[in-house]
Image (cartoon, rainbow, N blue to C red):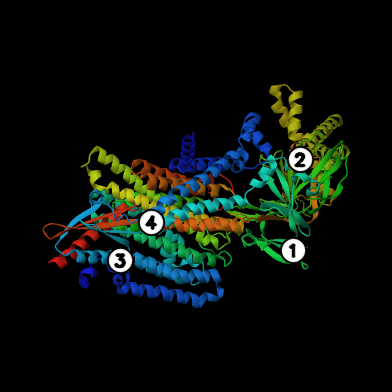
Amino acid sequence: MMTNARSTSSRLFHFLGSMNLAITLLVLLAIASVIGTILQQNKPYTDYEVKFGSFWFEIYRMLGLYDVYSAIWFLVILAFLILSITVCVIRYTPGILRELRHYRESAKEKSLLAMKHHAVLTTNLPNPDIQAIAQQALKSEKFRFRIANNDSHTTLAAMSGAGNRWGYWFTHLGMIVLLLGGLLDSRLPLMLAEWQGKLKPETRNIPASEVPQISRLGPQSFAYRGSVDVPEGKRANVIFLNVRDGYLVQRLPFEVEVKDFRVEHYSTGQPKSFESDIVIYDPDHKEPISTTISVNHPMIYKGTAIYQASFGDGGSEIDMRLRPFNVQYANQDVKGNIFQNYTLKASNANYQVELKDFRIFNINPVTDEKGKVHQKNMGPSLIFRLRNAAGEAIEYTNYMAPVEIEGRPYFISGVRTSPADPQRFLHIPADSNSSVDLFFNYLRKLQDNAAVRKAVTNMTQDSMKDSELSNPAMQEQVIDSMIRLTEMFASSGFEGIQQDLAQRFPKEKVEEASKAFMKVLQAALRAVYMDTLAEQGKTELTDKDWLFFDDSLAAIANLPFYGSPWYVQMTNFKHIQASGLQMTRSPGQNIVYLGSIMLTIGVFLLFYIARRRLWILIKPRDDGQSDVILAGTTNRNQKDFDHYFQGLQSAFQRALTARGA
Amino acid sequence: MSVPQEAMQEFLDKPSLLQRLKTFDWIWAALVVLGAAFVFMRYHTAMDVYEKSFLVLAVPGLVGLGWHWRSIEPYTLAVTLISLLGIWLYHGDYANAEKVFGLKYMFSSQSAIMWMSALFVLATLFYFAGLFGNSEFLEKTGSGLTWTALVMGLSGLMIRWYESYLVDPEFGHIPVSNLYEVFILFCVITGLLYLFYEQRYRNRTLGGFVLLIISAAVAFLLWYSFDRDAHKIQPLVPALKSYWMKIHVPANFIGYGAFALAAMVSVAYLIKDAAVKRAPDGWTAKRLPSLDMLDDLTYKAIALGFAFFTIATILGAMWAAEAWGGYWSWDPKETWALIVWLNYAAWLHLRFTKGWRGTTMAWWAIIGLFVTLFAFLGVNMFLSGLHSYGEL
């Protein structure tokens, strides 16, 4: 039984230290690592579910593919790698030590002659002279050697390049040190606590103060790495550690306030630097500590490094004017903050307005007439979602100031129903006061039947005055259809009119009818437009005014697809930024660096110092001459050694004959 | 009993380093020292402690390199002279790049890089012509052209460095910050590594093989620069504004260059191996170097690449600790660097401990290049992560 047990454990030891296992682990680790780069890690779980379908989503989740580098099987590979390297070092160290101590001066003549590098020289020098030459040669070549005298021969056994063996230790111990250092900074303690049920990541989007105790970590944590967004003027005493689809709240041993966050720009408009003025409040210090951090220049306080990692909105204050597209309702002025939701009443339904983001700069590529692309700042924008009672949301990006396109200014609003969709844009033409007033005046007039009637009546009377067709009944008919068409256009655009026509006319007549109706509609729209301008005292219309007319019609035609009952106009804002701070405590870092340095030194020793052995066996012959057997081995760079050994051999030859001649 | 001195002096027929040095070596070393002294005196007020120590360490480093490999001496002199000439021609005005003849056609960084590109392609043709035509003259011309290309390439980078300050003093940075610039660096480093081994092994037949991959890089460079205007000097994004970039990137490219060299030598190995098996006395078998030498060269290149890649990855981790808040984030680029490292670590282990040689290892070295290529380019093209500087 005893022998059996010993053989099992020794077999296990042998297996763990084997090269096959080591190579397998290296390759396995490489393949496992690939998975984590192909599949984006730690995204919201719903994204994965949408991507893979619920069946595969569940399987991949169980395999830990959404967080490969924390998956149990991945950690097991790493653990085996540490074990394998350790066993390897333990197993080979005694042999290496023995080898470093043993000169092998008892090597037999036969085994020397069997070496790839060997030479037999003959000389008539006396034995002591040969020995002296050999010794001097070995010394000048920096070999350490021993001499063994035998009754039949003398052997000088020499070696050099012990550094190569140090290379072996340095690389392998360096790897162990490095991996253990990394382990200190890892989330292994958190994972263990989670398995024991002492810790549970929070998945709800709730304020840090409401997160239950089971998702919290105290300030005494050994190592952590997480982040927090701190609005300007606010303080934070926790950071959030992302864990799969949730997070943990890590209490900091101090408080950090962000005084100010700044982005500096190059002359081209590209960002040059991101920096935050921060203040650290620590009960251990009477005076708060003020400093500035920026990208690549973190601050280290009590073992915690504070990095400038990102930035975003910190809840900017936004003044909005909601302009309904429907004439029956009045404008509303609303004040709000980014990240807040507001319930507002529009026409006959309630909507939730969710303010998502505010951007003070929007630098976009713009192509000029010559086809050259320029970077252009389009000014501040507001991003918000409008959610209806059914919970469906549309996302809008509204620019505060008009943007010039082909020489004409527009208020631009981007629309999309899902973040994956490309944005579609509504272009509302800006009037000469850079406002949307003219457009909305016109739109309201189009929806006001009385106003339309007034405008088109004037117009038809003007145009029919001279006509012989002057016929009050027909005139009335034309006016009625104009009002009806205008109303239809103002509520459902050209598309609505086409649908209406398709219902009322047989297929073959639709096109003809459509042409006629469009003419009538155009005339009515023009009449109302001219009326709108006339109210402002403008009776002579320029090309510019007609372009505005065209742009207004294009915008109105798109309104049915816009999906919002209002045009949300940003009228004022107070920009409040938030600085994204990453905080890390990694006590293992210096250990990792130590391991890295050992590894580097080791690699160079291993590659560039060859372990060489030489034997010089001097054997007197019966005829008074002596045979000198020169032999050598190396563990690196055989080709270099070929050359070296040849040089050695001919030098010996020369030295032995020069004296002997 | 003493051994006569003269016998021992000649013992290994190997003079010491100092004995081997010739007058020119000393003149060159003096120039390096003077150059560094000049830079120090003139710019020390603008330098921080790192820059000062780098300058000081650069002197023994460069002198050692030059004495160890003599060709570096005339090479650095040529690069220095051309760079200074280019800088002088600018007279402090970037607009001169289009106005001054010498800049427009020769020494503005863009022109110098074009010259480098053309010369590399030409050198590839000459090397192959020399190989097929069994002509030493053509091969020597190939070496000459490669040296010239390397002079133009490195000078181009140096001048580009200066240009970046001319465009806007705030833009100024070492030209290793985007794909365009590092491709030039790759061409230069791979070329230098190749020439080093060409001289060590006294064999020019591999020039075509190695320059083939440099020519491929040149093709990419030209496409990138004409199609995407990549040669335009852009300011650095805040994440790259760090001293680490200056050492992390070049160390990485010594690794990439050496791995590329190893893969191309392995291609030659496989061709030679197939040729020897088919017809041991055939033309191909005779023209290409011995399998032993090819195997040895592959190993040396991989060992060198591995050593520098290790350093580069560690430097990268140190930089990451300063910029991203952690020395290791399993970011795709980091992870692929690890994969490359593991791959060559496995290669070296098999060679050291199991003595693997031959076609398997040659194929592996070639596959290794593809893994490296993915880490270098593929990650930026297909995967998203923190390292998004060199996007195509």
- Image vertical order of residue B311 relative to residue A499, above or below: below
Q: Which mark, residue A556?
A: 2
Instruction: Report which residue position mark 1 lands on.
Output: A279
Q: Residues within 10 Å of mark 4 (few under 14, many from 20)?
A: some
Q: Secondary structure at mark 2?
A: helix
Please tell me whether mark 1 or mark 3 is closer to you in this view: 3
Please tell me whether mark 4 or mark 3 is closer to you in this view: 4
Residue A72: name its quadrant. Answer: top right
Is residue B205 or residue A442 the one in the foreground?
B205
Q: Quadrant of the C terminus of chain A?
A: bottom left
Q: Secondary structure at mark 3?
A: helix
Q: Is residue B122 shown to the viewer in this render?
A: yes
**Residue B255, horizontal then vertical, whole percent:** 44, 54
The furthest residue to the left: A623
**Residue B225, horizontal then vertical, whole percent:** 48, 53
Is residue A579 or residue B335 the one in the foreground?
B335
Residue B269: name its quadrant. Answer: top left
